[in-house]
């Protein structure tokens, strides 16, 4: 008995990917949309410069989140889904 490599039912084991953050800048506590693909899974996190963000909505191609407290200026945003890391996208945390 061998394992079939082809015909796995269309499972995609690619990591999540961020396409855009809308808007591309915001203040701490403001809501932003992280847009991309493969955001569904059992263990998910959006982080801004290593700080986990509160996510209010998860969808396959979108995560609605608030910007966590942290330093102002350019920071990298990453989505982790089931241990797989997305590409990093630059986001700007603006002042009060």
Image (cartoon, helix red, strand yellow):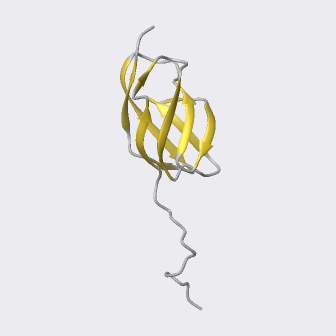
Query: Observer-nearest residue: 92 or 35?
Result: 35
> Quadrant of the image for the N terminus?
bottom right
Q: Where is residue 16 drawn, in percent x and y?
A: 47, 51
Q: Where is residue 69 drawn, in percent x and y?
A: 51, 18
Q: Going by the picture, which residue comes out furthest to the front?
A: 23
Which image quadrant is residue 62 in? top right
Identify which residue is drawn at 55% across, 39% down. 63
Left or right of 77 on screen, residue 62: right
Which image quadrant is residue 74 in? top left
Identify which residue is drawn at 43% across, 44% down. 18
Identify which residue is drawn at 60% across, 29% down. 54
Marks counted in the figure total: 0
Where 77 falls versus 84 (above or below)?
above
Where 3 falls versus 51 (above or below)?
below
Identify which residue is drawn at 54% across, 84% down. 4
Where 72 falls versus 85 (above or below)?
above
Which image quadrant is residue 71 in? top left
Q: Where is residue 94 drawn, in percent x and y?
A: 40, 15
Q: Going by the picture, which residue comes out furthest to the top?
A: 96
Left or right of 29 on screen, residue 56: right
Q: Where is residue 59 drawn, in percent x and y?
A: 60, 46
Query: Observer-nearest residue: 86 or 39?
Result: 39
Query: Observer-nearest residue: 96 or 8?
Result: 96
Q: Going by the picture, which residue comes out furthest to the bottom?
A: 1
> Quadrant of the image for the C terminus?
top left
């Amino acid at each position: 008995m061998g394992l079939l490599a082809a015909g796995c039912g269309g499972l995609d084991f690619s990591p999540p990917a961020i396409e855009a953050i809308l808007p591309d800048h915001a203040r701490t506590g403001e809501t932003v949309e992280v847009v991309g693909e493969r955001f569904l899974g059992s263990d998910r996190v959006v982080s801004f410069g290593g700080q986990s963000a509160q996510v209010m909505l998860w969808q396959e191609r979108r995560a609605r989140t608030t910007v966590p407290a942290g330093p102002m200026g350019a920071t990298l945003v990453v989505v982790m889904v089931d241990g797989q890391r997305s590409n990093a996208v630059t986001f700007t945390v603006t002042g009060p």
